[in-house]
């Protein structure tokens, strides 16, 4: 009964599909080893139930499918969907880049040229300073 409960409450969470599927198959194999195997319909139902919101469209597609799907096929489709989701994520968080750019520009406002760590600031007419050049980009 404990293994059935673990299987029913297993969630993908932040795990990869590979890790989630490994946890899932470990529980399924344990049930089979104690002579309580599950049919493919129950296996797929348990597997889909733990996927989470990112996989809702995938779950809808699989549950609407008329032809039966084997667990190995489902795993391949899950891996492909995971790759698709990863490709949809931006490579760089542009809000952080924009904030850093704005902060760097604001910090350079007191300089005549807006860079170089104050070497050419408005109080220095000759541009000589003992501080090294520090460019803020």
Image (cartoon, rainbow, N blue to C red):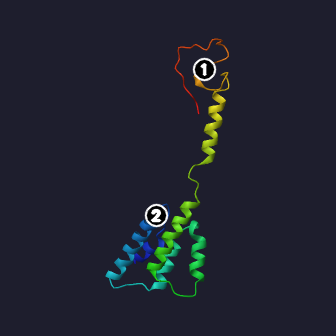
| First reached walking from the N terminus: tag 2 or tag 1 | 2
Q: Residues within 10 Å of mark 2 (few under 14, many from 20)?
A: few
Residue at the outermost left position = 33
Residue at the outermost front position = 126
Residue indicated by mark 2: 16
Confirm whether residue 85 shows in the render: yes
Q: Nearer the viewer, residue 7 or 64?
A: 64
Q: Residues within 10 Å of mark 1 (few under 14, many from 20)?
A: many
Q: Position of residue 120 (x, y in %)?
A: 62, 18
Q: Position of residue 88 (x, y in %)?
A: 59, 60
* Secondary structure found at label 1: helix
Q: Quadrant of the C terminus?
A: top right
Q: Nearer the viewer, residue 96 or 91?
A: 91
* Secondary structure found at label 2: loop
Residue indicated by mark 1: 118
Confirm whether residue 2 shows in the render: no
Residue found at x 66% / y 13%? 123
Residue found at x 47% / y 74%? 76
Figure quadrant of residue 21: bottom left
Residue 90 shows which numbered tag?
none
């Amino acid at each position: 009964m404990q293994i059935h409960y673990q299987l029913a409450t297993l969630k993908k969470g932040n795990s990869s599909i590979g890790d989630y599927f490994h946890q899932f198959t470990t529980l399924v194999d344990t049930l089979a080893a104690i002579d309580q195997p599950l049919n493919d319909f129950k296996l797929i139902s348990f597997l889909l139930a733990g996927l989470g919101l990112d996989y809702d469209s995938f779950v809808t597609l699989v549950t609407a499918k008329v032809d039966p799907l084997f667990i190995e096929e489902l795993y391949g489709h899950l891996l492909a969907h995971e790759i698709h989701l990863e490709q949809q994520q931006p490579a760089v968080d542009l809000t952080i880049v924009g904030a850093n750019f704005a902060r760097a520009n604001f910090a350079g406002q007191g300089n005549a040229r807006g860079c170089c760590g104050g070497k050419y600031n408005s109080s220095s007419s000759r541009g000589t300073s003992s501080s090294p050049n520090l460019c803020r980009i």
